[in-house]
Amino acid sequence: MTRWNAIWLAIVAALLIAVPTVIGNEFYVNMASQVLIYALFALSINMMLGYGGMVSLGHAGYLGLAGYACILLTINGFDQLSAAILALAFSTVMAGFFGMLSLRAPGLGFIMITLALGQIVWGIAYRANDLTGGDNGLRLPARPMPFGIDLNSAPRFYYFALAVVAVALFFIWRFSRSPFGASLMGARDQPRRMSMLGHNVWLIRWLTFVLAGFWGSVASLLFVYYNLFLSPHALGLQQSAEILLMAILGGASSLAGPIVGAAIITLVKNVISSYVERWNTLLGAIFVIVIIFMPYGLVPGCRELWRRIAQRRKPSASKAASEPAA
Amino acid sequence: MSADTAANGQTPVLELKGLSKSFGGLHAVRGVTFKIMPGDRKAIIGPNGAGKTTLFNLITGIFPASSGQVLLFGQDITGWQSHRRTALGMARTFQITSLFPRLTVLDNVLLAIEGLRPSKFVMWRFLSSYRDVYDKAHQLLEQAAFADRANTEVRYLSHGEQRQLEIVLGLASDPKILLLDEPAAGLSSGESVEMTEFLMRLDPELAILLIEHDMDVVFDLAHTISVLHFGEVLETGKPEQIKNSQKVQEIYLGTG
Ligand SMILES: Nc1ncnc2c1ncn2[C@@H]1O[C@H](COP(=O)(O)OP(=O)(O)OP(=O)(O)O)[C@@H](O)[C@H]1O
Ligand SMILES: [Mg+2]
């Protein structure tokens, strides 16, 4: 089983690395970069949603915090690296603060407070004209040049984003199998029992909130580097809701789910919207259909489907498990 | 201020002083006061709705007390959160089975053991790499005769096995006092006997506070019994005394 996992990982990695060469077309390579950025947003919100059972409707707020911080610092003379580090630090500290506010109330209260906090960030971005340029937004002068590598071409940026997302994915994978990850899932299912076992449920949730905020902020920096521009429109409720839907659509209980969800929603938004005017409706329809047939999302749903098909062909089942469709 | 000590100079494991709780106008627990010494086995009985579970929730910090004090080893822990009380040596089981149904028996026990270990905050190492935690888990499962079902998902266990696993999870933190909320609820008489024997085999130094409706379990295990009625301790005494008490018979026949 683990050997097949390793082979699968190698195949997926090879495919991802081949994307720019295979696709060629700059428009589609850029879209692949966007998929990666949203995948990281969805992965980070899923640390709370999937493992912790905490539904946040304010995740795009980090786009405002980290994004504006990074642009403002750069404009005011900081070099790109310092700007990035300071922006991440600022945004993560704010996540700590937001976490304290949001976790005062469980369940519905948590959703409402994250929603409110996201809207406050949006409101400030919109209103503080002198700082954020208000509705007109702010421009980042240039993409950073890590180790002197120019990221201006579409394939180069794609590889940069791929590297960042791969590192994040690695951390989140380890996280999900760590003692802490186990406690987080325990606190999701039986909070009272967990406290009686000596676990500090509040602290577990708060740390997860902060970590999700950190990776959300990393995704935000990628977003700003990619677009070289940030305006309040990018951090509204719509954005937060879309990030949440990506994780749910792909399957919050799986590691790959949010990535698949991010890919589908980003592609529908960008590709289909040039053919179908009511792409938002289409997106809604896809979402409803998937959730009706696969209530736990696409990845767990397809896995279950595959298991059933393999079971039906029981005689040759041992061989069949090795070649699921991508 | 200073820790109350019993006549023989020992500090009580647990001491309640005028502990009370009201939900709005309902006084669920009223002025409960008692001490539990190391190795004590005390049962709390009383009709449905008497406030037994609520009393446990006050002792374990799930609800804040309206008034009164809870002392653990002489230390006032009235305002403490549950996990800190566990760290000081308190454990409990729940009247409504509260396990992790989709995890295996082993994983349930691992979570329980991790509860008091600093490694519970580690995020970059696999849980499966902590050999000492696994060893402890297997040892605990061995002791409770669960070793053969270590890899069974808890939802596939029988009700009786789940009730027993509740206790195993409570024991994982090596408590000094164990609070059992109707451990034998829903068990067959054979299973009840098995559970009682299991409880009697536990470390004699472990103090046990037991809520139970099954009188056979109570009389086998308890050294003292307190009767709770409308949130108040009506009577406390040795099992024979309670068995023959006029008042107790009245409330069980009258309102039970
Ligand atoms: N969270 C709560 N909010 C309001 N009332 C509550 C709450 N918990 C318990 N009560 C009330 O307090 C009273 C005591 O309930 P409790 O569960 O402590 O009884 P019990 O002695 O454990 O009964 P049983 O033998 O049925 O388990 C009941 O009237 C119950 O309705
Ligand atoms: Mg009860």
Image: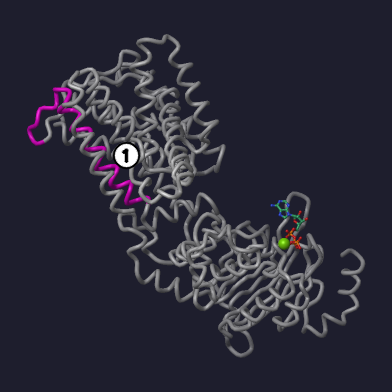
Residue drawn at x 22%, y 23% is A29
| Residue A28 in the figure: left or right of residue B170 | left
Q: Of the residues shown, which amino acid type is indicated by label 1?
A: Trp
Q: Foreground residue, B26 or B154?
A: B154
Q: Foreground residue, A280 or B231?
A: A280
Q: Residue furthest front?
A: A315
Residue drawn at x 52%, y 44% is A104
Q: How many marks?
A: 1
Q: Foreground residue, A241 or A92?
A: A241
Residue B250 quadrant:
bottom right
Q: Which chain does the numbered disc 1 sit on? A: A
| Residue A293 in the figure: left or right of residue A320 | right
Q: Tell me where residue A117 appears, x and y as whole percent.
A: 45, 31
| Residue A53 in the figure: left or right of residue B192 | left
Identify the magenta region: A147-176
User: Looking at the picture, does residue A149 appear above or below residue B5?
Assistant: above
Q: Tell me where residue B220 appears, x and y as whole percent.
A: 72, 82
Residue drawn at x 81%, y 65% is B47
User: Looking at the picture, does residue B36 appear above or below residue A193?
Assistant: below
> Magenta segment: does it hold B127?
no
- The 10 Å Cα crowd at callout 1, few under 14, some 14 to 19, many 20 or more, is many
| Residue A265 in the figure: left or right of residue B11 | left
